[in-house]
Image (cartoon, grey):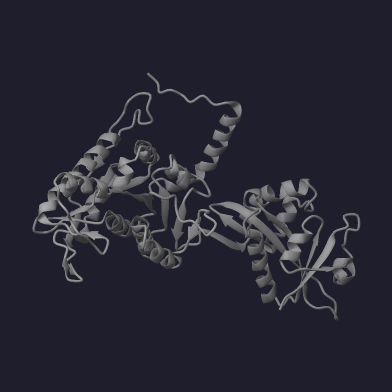
Protein backbone atom coordinates (compact mmCIF):
# COMPACT_ATOMS: atom_id res chain seq x y z
CA UNK A 1 0.00 0.00 0.00
CA UNK A 2 1.42 3.37 -1.00
CA UNK A 3 1.41 6.34 1.39
CA UNK A 4 -1.24 8.95 0.70
CA UNK A 5 -0.20 11.75 -1.64
CA UNK A 6 -1.07 15.29 -0.68
CA UNK A 7 -3.52 16.93 -3.07
CA UNK A 8 -2.28 20.30 -4.38
CA UNK A 9 -4.23 23.01 -6.12
CA UNK A 10 -2.36 24.30 -9.21
CA UNK A 11 -1.09 27.39 -7.40
CA UNK A 12 -0.07 25.40 -4.33
CA UNK A 13 1.62 22.77 -6.49
CA UNK A 14 3.58 25.46 -8.32
CA UNK A 15 4.64 27.02 -5.00
CA UNK A 16 5.81 23.60 -3.87
CA UNK A 17 7.79 23.04 -7.09
CA UNK A 18 9.48 26.44 -6.77
CA UNK A 19 10.33 25.80 -3.10
CA UNK A 20 11.70 22.36 -3.90
CA UNK A 21 13.92 23.75 -6.66
CA UNK A 22 15.14 26.53 -4.38
CA UNK A 23 15.97 23.99 -1.67
CA UNK A 24 18.13 21.87 -3.99
CA UNK A 25 21.38 23.80 -3.29
CA UNK A 26 20.88 23.24 0.44
CA UNK A 27 20.15 19.54 -0.02
CA UNK A 28 23.44 19.21 -1.88
CA UNK A 29 25.34 21.40 0.57
CA UNK A 30 24.13 19.50 3.67
CA UNK A 31 24.76 15.99 2.39
CA UNK A 32 27.42 14.12 4.45
CA UNK A 33 27.70 17.05 6.86
CA UNK A 34 27.56 16.53 10.64
CA UNK A 35 24.79 18.29 12.56
CA UNK A 36 24.33 18.21 16.35
CA UNK A 37 20.69 18.74 17.42
CA UNK A 38 19.95 19.55 21.05
CA UNK A 39 16.44 19.59 22.55
CA UNK A 40 15.33 19.58 26.17
CA UNK A 41 12.82 17.39 27.95
CA UNK A 42 10.21 20.12 27.36
CA UNK A 43 10.47 19.46 23.61
CA UNK A 44 9.92 15.73 24.15
CA UNK A 45 6.70 16.50 26.02
CA UNK A 46 5.40 18.94 23.39
CA UNK A 47 2.70 17.79 20.90
CA UNK A 48 4.95 18.88 18.01
CA UNK A 49 7.72 16.44 18.97
CA UNK A 50 6.38 13.71 16.68
CA UNK A 51 6.72 16.14 13.75
CA UNK A 52 10.28 16.91 14.86
CA UNK A 53 11.03 13.18 14.76
CA UNK A 54 9.63 13.00 11.21
CA UNK A 55 11.86 15.92 10.18
CA UNK A 56 14.88 14.25 11.81
CA UNK A 57 14.13 11.13 9.76
CA UNK A 58 13.94 13.31 6.63
CA UNK A 59 17.33 14.90 7.38
CA UNK A 60 18.79 11.44 7.87
CA UNK A 61 17.35 10.26 4.54
CA UNK A 62 19.04 13.23 2.82
CA UNK A 63 22.46 12.01 3.95
CA UNK A 64 22.96 14.33 6.93
CA UNK A 65 25.00 12.79 9.77
CA UNK A 66 23.02 13.42 12.94
CA UNK A 67 23.96 13.47 16.62
CA UNK A 68 20.92 14.05 18.84
CA UNK A 69 21.35 15.33 22.40
CA UNK A 70 18.30 15.37 24.67
CA UNK A 71 17.67 16.90 28.07
CA UNK A 72 15.33 15.65 30.80
CA UNK A 73 14.68 18.47 33.32
CA UNK A 74 10.85 18.28 33.53
CA UNK A 75 10.90 14.48 33.57
CA UNK A 76 13.46 14.49 36.40
CA UNK A 77 11.37 17.04 38.30
CA UNK A 78 8.30 14.85 37.92
CA UNK A 79 10.15 11.76 39.19
CA UNK A 80 11.49 13.68 42.18
CA UNK A 81 8.03 14.99 43.00
CA UNK A 82 6.55 11.51 42.89
CA UNK A 83 9.19 10.31 45.37
CA UNK A 84 8.81 13.47 47.47
CA UNK A 85 12.50 14.32 46.98
CA UNK A 86 13.96 17.81 46.74
CA UNK A 87 17.27 18.75 45.12
CA UNK A 88 18.68 22.25 45.55
CA UNK A 89 19.54 24.35 42.50
CA UNK A 90 22.74 26.41 42.65
CA UNK A 91 24.40 28.35 39.83
CA UNK A 92 21.49 27.17 37.65
CA UNK A 93 22.55 23.53 38.15
CA UNK A 94 20.83 20.78 40.07
CA UNK A 95 22.72 19.36 43.03
CA UNK A 96 22.35 15.64 42.31
CA UNK A 97 22.31 13.61 45.50
CA UNK A 98 22.80 9.85 45.55
CA UNK A 99 19.21 9.54 46.67
CA UNK A 100 17.97 11.45 43.60
CA UNK A 101 20.23 9.77 41.05
CA UNK A 102 17.68 7.01 40.39
CA UNK A 103 15.14 9.66 39.35
CA UNK A 104 17.67 11.09 36.90
CA UNK A 105 18.56 7.71 35.39
CA UNK A 106 14.90 6.70 35.11
CA UNK A 107 13.98 9.93 33.29
CA UNK A 108 16.95 9.81 30.92
CA UNK A 109 16.41 6.12 30.15
CA UNK A 110 12.68 6.53 29.43
CA UNK A 111 13.33 9.45 27.06
CA UNK A 112 16.01 7.45 25.22
CA UNK A 113 13.57 4.56 24.73
CA UNK A 114 10.83 6.95 23.60
CA UNK A 115 13.08 8.56 20.97
CA UNK A 116 14.31 5.18 19.73
CA UNK A 117 10.71 3.96 19.44
CA UNK A 118 9.57 7.02 17.51
CA UNK A 119 12.50 6.75 15.09
CA UNK A 120 11.63 3.11 14.50
CA UNK A 121 8.12 3.83 13.23
CA UNK A 122 7.62 2.62 9.68
CA UNK A 123 3.86 2.62 9.34
CA UNK A 124 2.27 3.05 5.94
CA UNK A 125 0.48 6.37 5.47
CA UNK A 126 3.01 8.06 7.76
CA UNK A 127 6.04 10.26 6.99
CA UNK A 128 8.24 7.47 8.40
CA UNK A 129 7.02 4.90 5.86
CA UNK A 130 9.94 2.95 4.43
CA UNK A 131 12.49 4.58 6.72
CA UNK A 132 15.20 2.34 8.08
CA UNK A 133 16.94 4.18 10.88
CA UNK A 134 19.32 2.68 13.41
CA UNK A 135 19.73 4.76 16.55
CA UNK A 136 22.82 4.15 18.67
CA UNK A 137 23.43 5.27 22.23
CA UNK A 138 26.10 4.20 24.67
CA UNK A 139 28.82 5.25 27.08
CA UNK A 140 30.28 7.84 24.71
CA UNK A 141 30.57 10.58 27.35
CA UNK A 142 33.13 10.41 30.15
CA UNK A 143 32.33 12.76 33.01
CA UNK A 144 33.98 14.18 36.10
CA UNK A 145 32.48 15.76 39.23
CA UNK A 146 31.41 19.38 39.02
CA UNK A 147 32.91 19.60 42.48
CA UNK A 148 32.40 22.16 45.20
CA UNK A 149 31.45 25.66 44.05
CA UNK A 150 30.76 28.55 46.43
CA UNK A 151 30.97 26.02 49.25
CA UNK A 152 28.23 23.86 47.73
CA UNK A 153 29.04 20.20 47.00
CA UNK A 154 27.32 19.26 43.75
CA UNK A 155 27.84 15.56 44.54
CA UNK A 156 26.79 13.53 41.45
CA UNK A 157 26.35 16.53 39.20
CA UNK A 158 29.18 16.49 36.68
CA UNK A 159 30.68 18.05 33.61
CA UNK A 160 32.03 16.55 30.40
CA UNK A 161 35.56 15.24 30.70
CA UNK A 162 36.00 13.59 27.30
CA UNK A 163 34.04 12.14 24.38
CA UNK A 164 34.60 8.92 22.50
CA UNK A 165 34.68 10.61 19.10
CA UNK A 166 36.14 7.59 17.30
CA UNK A 167 33.28 5.33 18.39
CA UNK A 168 30.62 7.88 17.46
CA UNK A 169 32.34 8.49 14.13
CA UNK A 170 32.16 4.78 13.29
CA UNK A 171 28.43 4.75 13.93
CA UNK A 172 27.91 7.85 11.79
CA UNK A 173 29.98 6.25 9.02
CA UNK A 174 27.57 3.27 9.20
CA UNK A 175 24.64 5.67 8.60
CA UNK A 176 23.37 5.47 12.18
CA UNK A 177 21.98 8.32 14.25
CA UNK A 178 23.91 8.82 17.49
CA UNK A 179 21.79 9.63 20.56
CA UNK A 180 23.31 11.24 23.67
CA UNK A 181 21.61 12.12 26.94
CA UNK A 182 22.48 14.38 29.89
CA UNK A 183 24.49 11.72 31.69
CA UNK A 184 28.13 10.66 31.66
CA UNK A 185 30.21 7.96 33.26
CA UNK A 186 33.39 8.23 35.30
CA UNK A 187 36.40 5.97 34.97
CA UNK A 188 35.34 4.41 38.30
CA UNK A 189 31.88 3.51 37.01
CA UNK A 190 29.85 6.31 38.58
CA UNK A 191 26.99 8.02 36.75
CA UNK A 192 26.93 11.83 36.66
CA UNK A 193 24.05 14.17 35.84
CA UNK A 194 25.19 16.66 33.15
CA UNK A 195 23.86 19.71 31.37
CA UNK A 196 22.54 18.58 28.00
CA UNK A 197 23.55 21.96 26.55
CA UNK A 198 27.15 21.33 27.58
CA UNK A 199 27.10 17.82 26.10
CA UNK A 200 25.79 19.19 22.79
CA UNK A 201 28.26 22.09 22.68
CA UNK A 202 31.34 19.99 23.47
CA UNK A 203 30.23 17.31 21.01
CA UNK A 204 29.80 19.87 18.23
CA UNK A 205 33.22 21.36 18.95
CA UNK A 206 34.94 17.97 19.11
CA UNK A 207 33.44 16.94 15.76
CA UNK A 208 34.00 20.40 14.25
CA UNK A 209 30.34 20.02 13.30
CA UNK A 210 28.93 21.99 10.40
CA UNK A 211 25.91 22.95 12.51
CA UNK A 212 24.82 22.98 16.13
CA UNK A 213 21.05 23.42 16.42
CA UNK A 214 19.30 24.31 19.69
CA UNK A 215 15.57 23.57 19.73
CA UNK A 216 14.16 25.75 22.49
CA UNK A 217 10.88 27.29 23.54
CA UNK A 218 11.46 30.50 21.60
CA UNK A 219 11.88 30.88 17.83
CA UNK A 220 15.11 32.82 18.29
CA UNK A 221 16.25 36.22 19.52
CA UNK A 222 14.00 39.25 19.11
CA UNK A 223 15.05 42.85 18.51
CA UNK A 224 13.47 45.90 20.15
CA UNK A 225 10.53 45.75 17.73
CA UNK A 226 9.93 42.04 18.43
CA UNK A 227 11.26 40.93 15.05
CA UNK A 228 13.48 37.87 14.76
CA UNK A 229 17.19 38.70 14.71
CA UNK A 230 18.29 36.61 11.74
CA UNK A 231 22.04 36.63 12.24
CA UNK A 232 24.54 37.51 14.95
CA UNK A 233 28.24 37.12 15.49
CA UNK A 234 29.41 35.43 18.71
CA UNK A 235 30.93 38.64 20.08
CA UNK A 236 27.46 40.23 19.98
CA UNK A 237 25.94 37.70 22.40
CA UNK A 238 27.31 38.93 25.75
CA UNK A 239 24.51 41.45 26.32
CA UNK A 240 21.84 38.90 25.45
CA UNK A 241 23.38 36.26 27.74
CA UNK A 242 23.47 38.68 30.68
CA UNK A 243 19.87 39.69 29.98
CA UNK A 244 18.53 36.12 29.82
CA UNK A 245 20.48 34.92 32.88
CA UNK A 246 17.90 36.70 35.01
CA UNK A 247 14.65 35.30 33.61
CA UNK A 248 15.21 32.66 30.88
CA UNK A 249 17.81 30.11 31.89
CA UNK A 250 17.20 27.89 28.84
CA UNK A 251 17.92 30.70 26.38
CA UNK A 252 20.97 31.79 28.39
CA UNK A 253 22.38 28.26 28.21
CA UNK A 254 21.69 28.05 24.48
CA UNK A 255 23.41 31.39 23.87
CA UNK A 256 26.41 30.44 25.98
CA UNK A 257 26.72 27.19 24.03
CA UNK A 258 26.27 29.01 20.73
CA UNK A 259 28.98 31.52 21.57
CA UNK A 260 31.46 28.91 22.72
CA UNK A 261 30.81 26.61 19.75
CA UNK A 262 31.00 29.41 17.20
CA UNK A 263 34.30 30.69 18.58
CA UNK A 264 35.66 27.11 18.61
CA UNK A 265 35.17 26.30 14.94
CA UNK A 266 31.51 25.26 14.57
CA UNK A 267 30.47 26.97 11.33
CA UNK A 268 26.88 27.87 12.19
CA UNK A 269 24.72 27.64 15.30
CA UNK A 270 20.94 27.90 14.98
CA UNK A 271 18.28 28.81 17.56
CA UNK A 272 14.79 27.62 16.59
CA UNK A 273 11.59 26.57 18.36
CA UNK A 274 10.48 23.02 19.08
CA UNK A 275 6.88 24.30 19.10
CA UNK A 276 6.94 25.49 15.47
CA UNK A 277 5.98 22.74 13.03
CA UNK A 278 8.61 22.51 10.30
CA UNK A 279 11.15 24.82 11.96
CA UNK A 280 14.04 22.46 11.16
CA UNK A 281 13.08 22.29 7.48
CA UNK A 282 12.57 26.04 7.10
CA UNK A 283 15.82 26.86 8.91
CA UNK A 284 17.94 24.45 6.90
CA UNK A 285 16.39 24.56 3.43
CA UNK A 286 15.33 28.17 2.89
CA UNK A 287 17.58 31.15 2.30
CA UNK A 288 16.44 33.26 5.26
CA UNK A 289 15.56 30.48 7.66
CA UNK A 290 13.06 30.83 10.49
CA UNK A 291 15.17 31.47 13.61
CA UNK A 292 18.43 33.09 14.68
CA UNK A 293 21.82 32.02 13.35
CA UNK A 294 25.14 32.66 15.09
CA UNK A 295 28.22 32.47 12.91
CA UNK A 296 31.78 33.72 13.02
CA UNK A 297 32.02 33.34 9.23
CA UNK A 298 30.89 35.74 6.52
CA UNK A 299 27.42 34.37 5.81
CA UNK A 300 26.63 37.27 3.51
CA UNK A 301 29.37 39.40 1.98
CA UNK A 302 29.82 42.48 -0.16
CA UNK A 303 32.51 41.91 -2.77
CA UNK A 304 33.56 42.85 -6.26
CA UNK A 305 31.84 40.78 -8.93
CA UNK A 306 33.45 38.07 -11.03
CA UNK A 307 32.54 36.64 -14.42
CA UNK A 308 30.65 33.83 -12.63
CA UNK A 309 28.18 36.44 -11.32
CA UNK A 310 26.93 37.54 -14.75
CA UNK A 311 23.97 35.15 -14.71
CA UNK A 312 22.89 36.37 -11.28
CA UNK A 313 23.24 39.99 -12.37
CA UNK A 314 21.05 39.41 -15.41
CA UNK A 315 18.40 37.77 -13.24
CA UNK A 316 18.46 40.77 -10.88
CA UNK A 317 18.63 43.55 -13.49
CA UNK A 318 16.27 42.37 -16.25
CA UNK A 319 12.97 43.19 -14.45
CA UNK A 320 14.21 46.70 -13.66
CA UNK A 321 15.36 47.17 -17.26
CA UNK A 322 12.00 46.01 -18.58
CA UNK A 323 10.27 48.56 -16.32
CA UNK A 324 12.53 51.31 -17.66
CA UNK A 325 14.12 51.93 -14.27
CA UNK A 326 17.57 50.89 -15.49
CA UNK A 327 19.25 51.15 -18.88
CA UNK A 328 19.42 47.79 -20.68
CA UNK A 329 22.79 46.02 -20.56
CA UNK A 330 23.43 42.99 -22.74
CA UNK A 331 25.23 39.93 -21.41
CA UNK A 332 28.26 40.91 -23.51
CA UNK A 333 28.32 44.38 -21.97
CA UNK A 334 27.97 42.98 -18.45
CA UNK A 335 30.83 40.58 -19.11
CA UNK A 336 33.07 43.36 -20.39
CA UNK A 337 32.18 45.68 -17.46
CA UNK A 338 32.08 43.04 -14.71
CA UNK A 339 35.08 44.54 -12.90
CA UNK A 340 33.05 47.70 -12.25
CA UNK A 341 30.32 45.82 -10.34
CA UNK A 342 30.02 45.01 -6.66
CA UNK A 343 27.54 42.42 -5.39
CA UNK A 344 26.04 41.16 -2.16
CA UNK A 345 25.84 37.38 -2.25
CA UNK A 346 24.14 34.95 0.10
CA UNK A 347 24.44 31.20 -0.42
CA UNK A 348 25.08 31.60 -4.14
CA UNK A 349 22.30 34.13 -4.81
CA UNK A 350 23.00 37.75 -5.81
CA UNK A 351 20.82 39.89 -3.53
CA UNK A 352 22.09 43.32 -4.60
CA UNK A 353 24.47 44.98 -7.02
CA UNK A 354 25.85 48.36 -8.06
CA UNK A 355 28.54 49.57 -10.43
CA UNK A 356 31.27 52.21 -10.12
CA UNK A 357 32.32 53.78 -13.43
CA UNK A 358 35.31 56.19 -13.26
CA UNK A 359 34.68 59.22 -15.51
CA UNK A 360 37.54 60.53 -17.68
CA UNK A 361 38.35 64.05 -16.51
CA UNK A 362 40.00 67.03 -18.12
CA UNK A 363 42.88 69.15 -16.86
CA UNK A 364 40.79 71.34 -14.54
CA UNK A 365 38.28 68.68 -13.44
CA UNK A 366 38.43 66.74 -10.16
CA UNK A 367 38.45 62.96 -10.04
CA UNK A 368 34.89 61.75 -10.59
CA UNK A 369 32.92 58.54 -10.98
CA UNK A 370 29.35 57.49 -11.64
CA UNK A 371 27.35 55.07 -9.50
CA UNK A 372 25.00 53.05 -11.70
CA UNK A 373 22.93 49.88 -11.75
CA UNK A 374 21.95 49.99 -8.08
CA UNK A 375 19.54 47.08 -7.69
CA UNK A 376 18.24 44.99 -4.77
CA UNK A 377 16.25 41.78 -5.00
CA UNK A 378 12.55 42.60 -4.34
CA UNK A 379 12.43 40.28 -1.31
CA UNK A 380 15.19 42.30 0.40
CA UNK A 381 14.31 45.89 -0.45
CA UNK A 382 13.22 46.71 3.09
CA UNK A 383 16.71 45.88 4.32
CA UNK A 384 19.77 48.15 4.24
CA UNK A 385 21.55 46.23 1.46
CA UNK A 386 21.28 49.11 -1.01
CA UNK A 387 23.02 51.42 1.46
CA UNK A 388 25.53 48.70 2.29
CA UNK A 389 26.68 48.20 -1.29
CA UNK A 390 26.67 51.95 -1.96
CA UNK A 391 28.99 52.58 1.01
CA UNK A 392 31.23 49.75 -0.18
CA UNK A 393 31.66 51.46 -3.57
CA UNK A 394 32.16 54.85 -1.93
CA UNK A 395 35.11 53.38 -0.01
CA UNK A 396 36.40 51.85 -3.24
CA UNK A 397 36.15 55.27 -4.95
CA UNK A 398 38.12 56.96 -2.15
CA UNK A 399 40.87 54.36 -2.54
CA UNK A 400 41.07 55.32 -6.22
CA UNK A 401 41.43 59.02 -5.39
CA UNK A 402 37.93 59.92 -6.61
CA UNK A 403 36.59 63.08 -4.98
CA UNK A 404 33.01 63.22 -6.22
CA UNK A 405 30.31 60.75 -7.24
CA UNK A 406 27.44 61.26 -9.64
CA UNK A 407 24.17 59.38 -10.03
CA UNK A 408 21.69 59.65 -12.89
CA UNK A 409 18.22 58.32 -12.06
CA UNK A 410 14.61 58.57 -13.18
CA UNK A 411 12.78 56.80 -10.32
CA UNK A 412 14.88 56.69 -7.13
CA UNK A 413 15.73 60.35 -6.47
CA UNK A 414 14.53 60.37 -2.86
CA UNK A 415 16.55 57.29 -1.94
CA UNK A 416 19.79 58.88 -3.19
CA UNK A 417 18.99 62.09 -1.31
CA UNK A 418 18.65 59.94 1.84
CA UNK A 419 22.13 58.55 1.11
CA UNK A 420 23.72 62.00 1.21
CA UNK A 421 23.59 62.94 -2.50
CA UNK A 422 22.57 66.46 -3.48
CA UNK A 423 20.66 67.74 -6.46
CA UNK A 424 22.88 68.72 -9.39
CA UNK A 425 22.48 69.46 -13.09
CA UNK A 426 23.82 68.12 -16.36
CA UNK A 427 26.24 71.06 -16.43
CA UNK A 428 27.85 69.75 -13.20
CA UNK A 429 28.87 66.52 -14.90
CA UNK A 430 32.44 66.22 -16.20
CA UNK A 431 32.62 67.03 -19.91
CA UNK A 432 33.16 63.40 -20.92
CA UNK A 433 29.94 62.36 -19.17
CA UNK A 434 27.95 65.34 -20.44
CA UNK A 435 28.71 64.21 -23.99
CA UNK A 436 27.01 60.87 -23.26
CA UNK A 437 23.96 62.27 -21.45
CA UNK A 438 20.69 60.91 -22.89
CA UNK A 439 18.32 63.91 -23.08
CA UNK A 440 15.47 61.65 -24.20
CA UNK A 441 15.70 59.68 -20.95
CA UNK A 442 15.91 63.00 -19.05
CA UNK A 443 17.52 61.51 -15.93
CA UNK A 444 17.92 63.61 -12.80
CA UNK A 445 21.51 64.26 -11.75
CA UNK A 446 22.77 63.96 -8.17
CA UNK A 447 26.23 64.57 -6.76
CA UNK A 448 28.06 63.56 -3.58
CA UNK A 449 31.43 64.88 -2.44
CA UNK A 450 33.69 62.28 -0.85
CA UNK A 451 35.52 63.60 2.20
Q: Position of residue 391 (x, y in %)?
A: 66, 68
In this rendering, is residue 199 above or below 364?
Answer: above
Q: Position of residue 384 (x, y in %)?
A: 63, 60
Q: Count up the numbered dots.
A: 0
Q: Residue furthest bottom?
A: 364
Give the quadrant of the C terminus. Answer: bottom right
Q: Quadrant of residue 431?
A: bottom right
Q: Residue furthest left?
A: 188
Residue displayed at 41% across by 45% down: 31
Q: Position of residue 117 (x, y in %)?
A: 25, 34
Q: Quadrant of residue 144?
A: bottom left
Can the viewer see residue 271 in this picture?
A: yes
Question: In the visual, does 159 lie left or right of 34?
Answer: left
Q: Residue furthest front?
A: 84
Give the quadrant of the N terminus. Answer: top left
Of 197 and 212, the residue lying toward us: 197
Can the viewer see residue 190 in this picture?
A: no
Question: In the visual, does 228 lie left or right of 196?
Answer: right
Q: Quadrant of residue 443?
A: bottom right
Residue displayed at 26% across by 47% down: 74
In this rendering, is residue 22 above or below 434?
Answer: above
Residue displayed at 27% across by 56% down: 199
Question: In the visual, does 443 lie left or right of 263?
Answer: right
Amino acid sequence: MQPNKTEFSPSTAQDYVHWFRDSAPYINAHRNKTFVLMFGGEAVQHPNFQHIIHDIALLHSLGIRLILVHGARPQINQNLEEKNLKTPIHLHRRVTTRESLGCVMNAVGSIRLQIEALLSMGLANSPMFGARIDVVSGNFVTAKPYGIRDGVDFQLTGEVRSLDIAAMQRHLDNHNIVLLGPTGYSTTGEVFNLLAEEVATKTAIAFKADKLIFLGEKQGLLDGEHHIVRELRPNQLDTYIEQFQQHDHEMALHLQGAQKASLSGVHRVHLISYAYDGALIEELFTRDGIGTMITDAHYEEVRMATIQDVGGLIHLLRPLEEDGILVYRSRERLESEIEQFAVIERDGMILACAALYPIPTGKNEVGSAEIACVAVDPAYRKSNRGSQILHFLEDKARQQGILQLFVLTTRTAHWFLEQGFQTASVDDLPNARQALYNFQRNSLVFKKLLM
